Amino acid sequence: MATKIKDNFATWINGSLADCSMGPEKAEPCRRLILLGPPGVGKGTQSQLLSEHIGACHLSTGDVFREAVRPSGCPRTPAMEAALDYMNRGQLVPDETVWELVRERSNCLHCQGGFLLDGFPRTLYQAEALNQFMQDENLLLSAVVNYQLPMSEIIWRLSGRRICRECKAVFHLTQRPPKTQGRCDLCNGELYQRGDDHPESISVRLEVYENSTAPLIYYYKHKGLLLSVDAHGTPEDIFKRTLTALEQRQPSPQ
Ligand code: AP5
C-alpha cells in the first residue's frame, strides 16, 4: 500500500508530464471529493485512510509546495520561490499561482479513480476556478467533506505533527507515534516537523483560514454538496463517520 501511495504522489507532484502508475483503473463509484476544514483538523490523515478505501488519489496543494523545497522536487520558478515564502509565513499563496499549479496537474482531476482534494480550493476565487473547469470538462464533484473541531485541539494536533520526508505519511508524537522514534512505519523514511507548524505560523494560518477559507462552507452548502463531519475521536472513528456520511448522501442538483 505504501508503494501505491508513493507512486500516486509522484504523479501529482510532477504534473501532467508524469506517467501515472495507477493507469486508467475505474473506481465504482468514482468519487471526486474536496476535504475542507481548518489547518490541522486531520484532512491529510483522513485522505490517507480514504484513499486506501475508495481508491481515489490524495491531491494536496500544500504537498506540491513542500516538495519544491527538495532538490529532486518540481522546478523552482520565481513564482514557486515567492509561493514558498508565503507558505512558510503561514499565509496563503496567491490564487493565480495556485490555480496555475493545479491546472498543470489537471490530468489528476480526470482520473477515473476519482480524487481527494486536500487544501484546495481555499478561497472563493479558487472554488470558482475549479467549478468552471469541472463544468467545462463535464466532471461532477461528488461532495465536500467539512471537518469540524475546536481550536484548542487543532493547536495540539499541529504542534505534535511529524511527517515522513519520503512517503508523506503523517504521525503525531503522542496520538500516533511512530514505532521507531524519528522513522516512518511505512517506508523507514526520516520524520520531520513542518516549518509552518511552529506557534507563530500556526496562529497566522488559523486567522487566514477564518477569513479566506471558512466562507467556502457556505459556498458548497448552497450548492448542496456539503457534508459536515465531527473531527473528535480517533482517526478511525472519524474515517467511519466520513464513510457513513458519504454513503447516506443523496445526490442533489448543483
Ligand atoms: P496544507 O499542506 O494544505 O496545510 P493545512 O491546510 O494547513 O492543513 P494541514 O496539512 O496543516 O492539516 P491537516 O488537516 O491535513 O491535518 P493532518 O492530517 O496533518 O497547506 C500548507 C500551506 O501551503 C498553506 O498554509 C498555504 O501557505 C499553502 N497552500 C496550500 N494550498 C494552498 C491553496 N490552495 N491556496 C493558497 N495557499 C495554499 O493532522 C494534523 C496532526 O494531527 C497530525 O500530527 C495527525 O497525526 C494528528 N491527528 C490527525 N487526526 C487526529 C485525530 N483524530 N486525533 C488526534 N490527532 C490526530
Image (cartoon, rainbow, N blue to C red):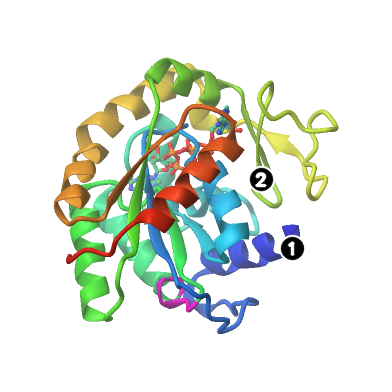
Q: Position of residue 42 (x, y in %)?
A: 50, 37
**Quadrant location of the C terminus?**
bottom left
| Tag of residue 3 | 1
Horizontal relation, residue 35 to residue 181: left or right: left
Tell me if residue 60 comes above or below residue 170 in the rendering. Answer: below
Q: Which residue is mark 2?
A: 169
Ligand 1: does it lie within 8 Å of the C-beta at label 1?
no
Stretch of the chain drawn in magenta? 108-112
Q: Amino acid at mark 2?
A: Ala
* Label 2 neighbour load within 10 Å: few <14, some 14-19, many 20+: many
User: In terms of secondary structure, where does tag 2 sit?
Assistant: loop
Q: Residue at x 23, y 42 (%)?
A: 217
Q: Residue at x 54, y 44 (%)?
A: 239
Question: Residue 8 falls in which quadrant of the image?
Answer: bottom right
Asked if disc 1 and disc 2 are in contact, CB closer than 8 Å, the reply is no
Q: Position of residue 96 (x, y in %)?
A: 25, 57
Q: Is residue 2 left or right of residue 153?
A: right
**110 inside magenta stretch:** yes
